[in-house]
Image (spheres, grey):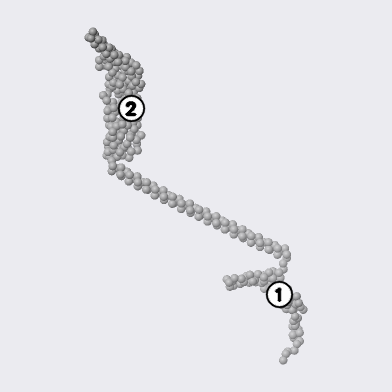
Amino acid sequence: MQPIIIVLIILVVLVFIALVKTIQVIPQASAAIVERFGRYTRTLNAGLNIVVPFIDSIRNRIDLREQVVPFPPQPVITQDNLVVNIDTVIYYQVTDARAATYEVASYIQAIEQLTVTTLRNIIGGMDLERTLTSREEINAALRGVLDEATGKWGIRVNRVELKAIEPPTSIQDSMEKQMRADRDKRAAILQAEGVRQSEILRAEGEKQSSILRAEGEAKAAALKAEGEAQAIRTVFESIHAGDADQKLLAYQYLQMLPKIAEGDANKLWIVPSEIGDALKGLSGAMGNFGPLGGGPTGFNPQNPGKGAPAQDTAAERREQPPID
C-alpha cells in the first residue's frame, strides 16, 4: 500500500506543477515571450494565457510602461577644447517585446552607450557658451538620433533631458566673475540713467517754472500798465469834460511839487517850459485877491477871512516926499 500512496502523491504533485505551468497570468501593461524548445513561439499579452507545460517556457517578462533611466555624468569635450560633464535622463517605452528581447542583448546598456556617443558628436560642434544656452537644441538632436536607432530594437524614446552641464571649476569661477562684472556694469548704467533722467526732469521743471513766472510777471505788468493807462484816460476825460483852464492846471502842478521833491535821491528837478505860463496865469488869477494883483483888499495868510491890510499904491509912493 505504501508504494501506491507514494506514487499517487507524486502524480498529484506533477499534476499541480503542470497546472501551474499551463496557466500563465500576465499583468496589465506587461508582455511575456514564449519559447518552445528554445525557439520563439508567441508573445503573451495581459490576462490569462494557456501554454503547454514542460514544452513551452517563458523566456522574458517585459514591462510595457514608460521607463525613466538616469545615466551617470559623462565627460564631453566642446569645440573650444573644454571638458564638461553632462547628466542625461532618458524616457523610453518598449513597443515590441519580441524585438527588445531578440534584437539587442541589453537595450538599457545600448541606449546608454548610444547616448554618450551622440552627445559627444553634438557637443563637439558647439562651444561652451552655446552648449550652456542650447539645451533644447541638444535635447531635440539627441532624441532624433536615439529614436531612429532604437526603432529596430522595439524601443521608442519619448524624451531626452539634460539634468546638468558642469564646466570645469576654473571656468565656473571665470563665468561668475564675468557675470558679477556684467551685473555691476548694468547697475552703474542704470544708476547713471536714473541720475540723468532726474537732472532732465529737474531742469524741465525749473524751465517750466521760469516760463510760468515770466508769463505771470508779464501779465501782471500788462495789467498794471493797462490799469494806469485806464486811470490816465479817466483823469484826462474828467479834466476834458470839466473844461479845466490853465489856472486850475497850474494849481494842480503846484500841489504835485512837494510829492516830486520827496525822497533823498531827488537831486535834480526837471521843470517843463510850460510852468512859466502856468505860474503867470496863476499869479494873474490871484492878483485880484492879494498883494500880487494890487486889489483893494489883499489876501492875509494869517487870517484869510479878514483879508490883508491895504498897501500903498505906486502913485501914492511917488507923491510922498522923501523922508529926511
Out of 197 and 173, give the one closest to the viewer.
Answer: 173
Q: Looking at the rendering, in which quadrant would you find the N terminus? A: top left
* Residue under the image location 26 percent in, 24 percent down: 105
**Most extreme residue toward the bottom, as rendered?**
324
* Residue under the image location 72 percent in, 91 percent down: 324
Location of residue 52 in the rendering, given as x and y in whole percent from the top left corner: 29, 13
Instruction: Count up the numbered dots.
Output: 2
Location of residue 166 in the rendering, given as x and y in whole percent from the top left corner: 30, 38
Amino acid type indicated by mark 1: Ser
Q: Give the image quarter of residue 175.
A: top left
Residue 157 vertical placement versus 210 (above, below)? above
Residue 132 vertical placement versus 234 (above, below)? above
Dot 1 corresponds to which residue? 283
Q: CA distance from mark 2 to mark 1?
A: 132 Å
**Which element is circle 2 on?**
strand
**Which element is circle 1 on?**
helix
Within-10-Å neighbours for mark 2: few <14, some 14–19, many 20+ = few
Disc number for residue 310: none
Residue 142 showing in the rendered view: no
Location of residue 302 in the rendering, given as x and y in whole percent from the top left corner: 71, 77
* Residue under the image location 68 percent in, 69 percent down: 252
Out of 214 and 181, give the one closest to the viewer.
Answer: 181
Q: Give the image quarter of residue 140.
A: top left
Foreground tag (2 vs 1): 2
Mark positioned earlier in the residue sequence (2 or 1): 2
Out of 110 and 292, give the one closest to the viewer.
Answer: 110
**Most extreme residue toward the left, as rendered?**
3
* Residue under the image location 24 percent in, 11 percent down: 6
Disc number for residue 67: 2
Location of residue 147 in the rendering, given as x and y in whole percent from the top left corner: 32, 27
